[in-house]
Image (spheres, rainbow, N blue to C red):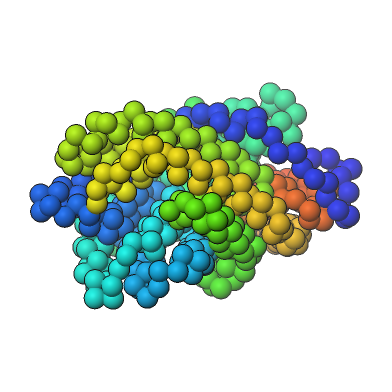
Amino acid sequence: MSSATPTSGTSPVRRLSLAGVLRLRRPSEIWFKPALSSVAAVAPPNLLLLALGRLDLAMYTMAGSLCALYAHNRPYAARARTLAWVVLGMIGGLAVALVTASLTRDAVVLVTVGALLAAVQKALCDATRVGPPGNVVLTFISSAALFVPQTLGQVPGHLALAAAAGVWAWLVGMAPAPVRPHGPERRATAQALNAAAAYAAAHGTGADEDHAPARAAGYAAVQAAWQTLLALPSTGARAATRRALERLVVRAEVALAAPADTDPERLRAWARALRGGGRIPRIGDAPADTDELLGVDAELAARPAPLRRRLGPLAPIAARTALGCALAGYASLALGIGRPYWALVTAAALYQANLTLTWSRAVQRVVGNLAGVLVFAAIAPLAHLGQALLVLCCLALNFGAEALITRNYWLGSVCVTPMALLVTEFAGYQATGDLMTERAVDTVVGALVGFLAAVVVTNRRAGSRVEQAVTAADRARERAARLLAEPAPAPGDLEAARRGLAAALTDLRATADGAAGEWWGRALPQERVVLAERSGHRTLAEAVRRQAVRPDRGAGTRTEDVRP
């Protein structure tokens, strides 16, 4: 970014690049957890239905079973609540779809209802940050259910199957808690330490602007760690563990503000210690620890923004989803394809935070789905040898999808697509060529129409939200600066102000990045963003210099007498 960038006017059209869209990333550190959970949640209901000769009911049990994909990054107390809400949301969407399917067979009405459901699911998942996998799984189930013939008398039984599988999925998601009850928060803290170490190690090797992405990644990891820790109870048996992890996150935060005074290897050593099952490293008993954790208590007392306020900025994304899904479904119907929900789900899967990211997801979706169609052609003969093999192939693809999707979305889609095609054959085998053709056409139609809807529905509020984020960052900086000017600020106040400033700067960077990928909006206040970030990080560094203990000083490192 340059300070010469204009602050008003009309943004130029941004070029949609293909560079890096299909590049593979390192797998997630816990890629195997959702992969194993999905298999553990899906296999028993499917095998039971297979034994009973009612594999045609598998769609309803899979609705509940797929809830096991959610909330793997959350502490178990928060995970229990999140999974319960996901199960209820899944059953709610399924109920609307089944009742609609029992009342009408008008395909236009069904597509319209599916599009509205997709928009609601997208908005709620984004507002509550339920993901990955976000709204796509919910939309896939509800959209498919719309096109399954129903009667009102069958709906309660089908919902009961979904609810029973959802309870099983909840148990699967909570199963690791007795073995490693503090695993999610330890991982989040370790990620914050490693991100801070990466920035500290790179600092001083070039211009400060060159390390802005590493700094932003570090602050994002720290904020994620705080969100994880603040979800833990502040009293009871887990309080000692939470306090020990809080001190480590504080050190990661301080390292980001003062990288020159930081030993990256020490941060990495603490992160490695958290990966295992040993005791939690504890930073020495510094006088500043009390103030730091009083600052955390101040954050705990702050109430989150109401859901209605969080939904407001998502209105353009929800409108894109509703319009794109509806038009994609209508286009599929016009082409005479029997499963318009495939085009609808393709469109629903595209919509990301901005148009540029939506374009990237559209390319990934098309490439992954078309490759997945070819995989289906290869494994269909094996799956058609018997229903047991059909179920086993679906389970293997289910595992592969979750194992690969963190490398890149298109790679996971290579497994998701044949799995979805095989699921359609649970009620009876179908012509492989017809399924392949319909899925390929629906993919292209859904991606094309869905992206065009995203172009039409502009997000003109993006620039305003950047200005609001700049203002919030400036206010947070001013608050921290006022406290720095005092000879002895109240205990915890400076720490709470510093952490609030770090959160505001993180939000500013995320908001600016999201708005930069939009089209047709007014030009962003880039100069104000740059100035707010620079002055904010200077104030953070000043706050660090007021710390009684630097990251590399103190009484040394020992272990907290708390087991995982």
Q: 436 or 157: which is nearer to us? A: 436
Q: Name the residue rendered at 55%, 59% in the picture.
A: 330
Image side of residue 477 versus residue 283, left or right: right
Left or right side of 449 for 530: right
Q: Residue at x 30, y 44 (%)?
A: 430
Give 98 or 233, whichever is nearer the viewer: 98
Residue 157, horizontal then vertical, whole percent: 21, 69
Q: Position of residue 499 (x, y in %)?
A: 59, 54
Percent of width and height locating residue 375: 38, 31
Could one spot residue 149 in this view of the protein?
A: yes
Q: Is residue 113 above or below residue 266?
A: below
Can see residue 416?
Answer: no
Q: Quadrant of residue 8?
A: bottom right
Q: Which quadrant would the N terminus be assigned to in this image?
A: top right
Give the residue furthest to the front: 336
Q: Report x, y in % for residue 244.
A: 39, 48
- Does residue 426 appear to the left or right of 467 in the view shown? left
Is 465 left, or right, of 72 in this rendering? right
Name the foreground residue: 155 vs 17: 155
